[in-house]
Image (cartoon, grey):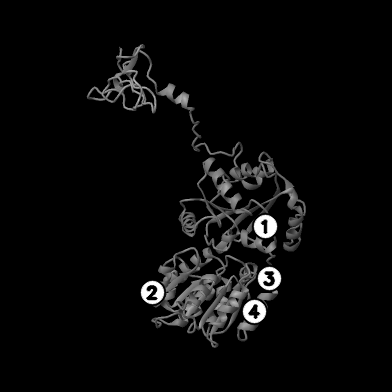
Amino acid sequence: MTTFAELGVDQDIVDALASKGIVDAFPIQEQTIPLGLPGQDIIGQAKTGTGKTFGFGIPVVQRLGLNPEHGVKALIVVPTRELAVQVYEDMDMLTQNRSTSVVAIYGGKAYEGQIEQLKAGAQIVVGTPGRLIDLSNQRLLDLSHATEVVLDEADKMLDLGFLPDIEKIFTKLPAVRHTQLFSATMPGPIVALARRFMSNPIHIRANDPDEGLTQANIEHLVYRAHSLDKDEIIARILQAEGRGKTVIFTRTKRAAQKLVDELSDRGFNAAAVHGDMSQESRERSMAAFKAGKRDVLIATDVAARGIDVDDVTHVINHTIPDDEKAYLHRVGRTGRAGKTGIAVTFVDWDDLHKWALINRALEFGQPDPVETYSSSPHLYTELGIPEGTKGRLVTAPKASVEKKPAERRHADKPAEGSSDAPRRRRRRTAGDEGAVTETAGDRSPGGGGTHDGGGKEHHDGNSAPRRRRRRRGGSRADGTPAA
């Protein structure tokens, strides 16, 4: 393994990495850092989870110098909010021993804080295309001096339809700049974009020659499962031996919220990240997952590229992704930083044609997924689930049955003759034929009568006088005609 110091990285950056236990470089970093430091344009291609952020981040920080002038000097464009937060954290760590300031610019958050950081002179901006263009159009973000430019996860930007926005951003950048483009896959439109906006880029592929299309350190298990049994299967997988942090992907926002509610009811510590949540709630869920306060994260594809957690042991595809690229990005949340992982994919009967395409593209050799139920023996053996495991934790709180109003009144009413029963006495009120039963607890301390004003009594306990009806144009009470 090659250390970062051997790659020519400045000592303060080496120290910042060492403070996080990072000493040796990954293959993509070994190949890109020596080229990026002198200013060579780079197209870096490597599978997700192989350290691309440091591959472009270290050259950016080092080329800006120890004390760069105030104002935006480097721009890193990412496709999603979650990825913006993750890249921001990595860049902030790299600059901890320098005066360089980093700001994250993305939607779903208030403008004011981001604008204040820009006005304070932040030199590195990490942002999503929409918010970057918005602030630039308002003349609050000046990109005319950004000589370091990075496009991260460019293929995802293509999938999300951001390429027109990227072209707008490039028109606001200086003509002479150092540009790096990083992506897990390299479709044709991305290559065309690179040729248009980059100067003689070097294309680097950091793949092992004997490695297949999928990461060798991830075990892929594919099951044909019934939709009504998936929650039960997942609940049992979550009790497998050695199961650490787990990411579950769903196709829709509604399915994600439904699953997190279901698993929480079963006793699991689950959180969700999807588009119907506010950005603040999404960030809280991600922070709780990274900190280990929640060990199950249920997400839609919006978060597929922003989950950079090294100790994710399992990825579960509750619903099959649309294509092989989405599959690779989902399962790439596990097996990161050289660790091993398990990817479980459920295929509905209606989605067998989708799986056939993914299976062919990724050369899995599993055209017919095994029909699997929560009671299938092979599920237990392949995933290391203890025998006899059920889909609900023993410590799960039992749902309390809501009592009916009549039952609550009966339960709250003390037994007749018990010491807790209020003293009862009978008294007869004037003008009333029946006896009024009154409890001591119903009377005010001063002895006044009822308090609701709804009966015949006033609040002083006396009977209300008979009301005399006035008649218009009729006779008086003494029988004489009215005037």
Mark 4 or mark 2: name the one nearer the start of the chain: 2
Label 3 sits on residue: 209
Q: Percent position (x, y) of residue 287?
A: 46, 57
Of the numbered discs in the image, which one, if any, rests on residue 321?
1
> Identity of the amino acid at label 3?
Pro
Q: What element carries label 1?
A: loop
Placement of 38 over or under 245, stated as above or below = below
> Identity of the amino acid at label 4?
Leu
Mark 4 or mark 3: name the one nearer the start of the chain: 4
Q: Does the rendering let one see residue 98?
A: no
Mark 3 to mark 1 CA distance (whole Å): 27 Å
Placement of 342 over or under 428, stated as above or below = below
Mark 2 or mark 1: name the one nearer the start of the chain: 2
Camera-nearest label, 3 or 1: 1
Q: Percent position (x, y) of residue 335?
A: 59, 59
Q: Is mark 4 on a helix, strand or loop?
A: helix
Residue nearest the observer in this picture, 422 or 130: 422
What residue do we see at 66% from left, 44% from top? Answer: 379
> Identity of the amino acid at label 1?
Pro
Camera-nearest label, 2 or 3: 2
Mark 2 to mark 1 CA distance (whole Å): 42 Å
Q: Callout 4: few (<14), some (14-19), or many (20+) C-alpha neighbours within 10 Å?
A: some
Label 4 sits on residue: 193
Mark 4 to mark 3 CA distance (whole Å): 27 Å
For the N terminus, the image quarter is bottom right
> Identity of the amino acid at label 2?
Asn
Camera-nearest label, 4 or 3: 4
Label 2 sits on residue: 97
Q: Callout 1: few (<14), some (14-19), or many (20+) C-alpha neighbours within 10 Å?
A: many
